Image (spheres, rainbow, N blue to C red):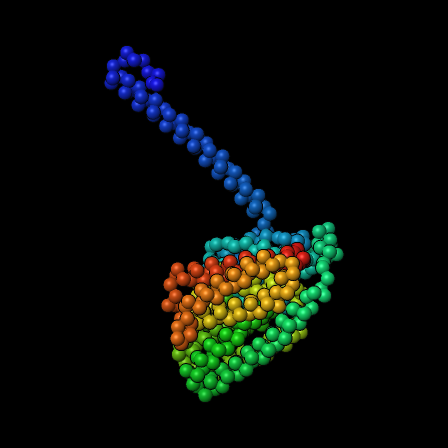
Amino acid sequence: MSNLPSGLPEKARSHNVLRLAVVGSVIIMIAAGGLFYYASRAAMQKRQANNSAETLVSIHAHSCEPNALTVPAGRTAFRIVNRSERAVEWEILDGVLVVEERENIAQGLSQVINANLMPGDYTITCGLLSNPRGTLHVTPTAESDASAKARPSMVAFIGPLSEYRVYLSSQSSALIKAVTALQQAIDVADLDQAQAAYLQARVVYQRIAPAAQRFADLDNAINARADYYEKREQDPGFNGFHRIEYALFDQHKVDGLALTVQRLQTDVTGLKQQLMAQTMAPEQLVGIITHNMRSLAEVRSNGEEERYSRADLSGFAANLEGTRKVIDLLRPLLAKTAGELLQRIDAASTAFGAELDSLKTESGYRPYDQVANGQRQQIADSAKALADALDGIDPALGLKGL
């Protein structure tokens, strides 16, 4: 019922109703503004709290700031800010091995690397491959000491690790053979044969890419893209697979590739030696395939990898093949302790495989420049779903936090 006096003229009553409506609207706006202010303040305080927990690193054209870091053992968030004029990467290395990395950080933007680090001294790379490397010192904590003491028995993992070593040996031998065929095609200046040999060699490489990418210097020599060299494709240091790909598929020539393919042959031979020489911890076995799937989802699904040949899909399929190898090696352990997780992993693996299979033609996978943006996003989503499922393996097997 209205609270307005009934004796007022109709026009006056309408005027009063309008005034009340305006006053009410103003009150609501003030209240909403207050709520927005307090929500904004709370969000800003939360961001500041998060940022204060992050170790900030700025990448400039030819250096990082700072380039000498000290952090406590355990989980550390590094916020990498790209202040250079091109997309760059940042890595943490333990000797020759990559511990954590973030690729393709766009100009003017930042990304966060969440690293779980054990005590010790590490090396950090910064932007261009020619830039000076920095240092990272990780100090022990009570938690890291306790984690080392609580490490589970490794007996159960001997079989999977040994079988994966056999797989790496056979596949790296196949890679050496494939690069030899590529070298022979280049030596006789047969462009068509060289293109076919390149594509075959890439498939073999992508099966073991998760393990190969642990070796920073070898991976840079074998697989670095032109972006990470100062003069890009014209840089004299640009070598490896992608230098050959650029000549064969963009320039359509084999001239001048003899020394490049010889060096590639030396490097893939050295890769096999390193794969056989270096031991791998159980948590690294899962970590390398998870990282590979996340890289596929976040970077390579955009067409970054095979930008001249457009053979990305066959590489993705080979990545999935290598990932499934590790899943199968751990299947008996997971079946005993984490059957539901194993079902989720298998479902994600099957879904990703079906997504790739839908892009096959009679002659093989579709060139990636013929894959629509929506389909590329579906590939990224499928790879991410598989990576998310794989993340559950270490906790399920008692390896979390090691």
From this viewpoint, which residue is outermost toward the bottom? 188
Rendered view: 187 above or below 38: below
Quadrant (top left/top right/bottom left/bottom right) for the C terminus: bottom right
In this rendering, the count of numbered labels is 0
95 sits to left or right of 59: right
- Residue at 31 percent across and 19 percent down: it is 16
Q: In this view, does 76 lie above or below 285?
A: above
Residue 70 in percent (x, y) is at 65, 54
Q: Residue drawn 65% across and 63% down? A: 333
Q: Quadrant of residue 196?
A: bottom left
> x, y percentage for residue 21?
34, 25
Which quadrant of the structure image shows residue 307? bottom left
Residue reaching furthest top?
7
Is 387 or 296 nearer to us in this picture?
Answer: 387
Q: Is residue 199 left or right of residue 2?
A: right
Q: Where, quadrant-wise, is the N terminus in this rendering?
A: top left
Looking at the image, which residue sits at the far right?
149
- Seen at 52% across and 63% down, the residue is 349
**Does any portion of residue 222 appear in the rendered image?**
yes
- In the rendered image of this protein, does residue 116 appear above or below residue 42? below
Q: Residue 390: x and y, percent? A: 57, 60
Residue in front for this viewpoint, 63 or 165: 165
Residue shown at 53% from the left, 75% from the top: 204
From this viewpoint, is residue 117 visible?
A: no
Give the percent coordinates (x, y) of residue 12. Answer: 27, 17
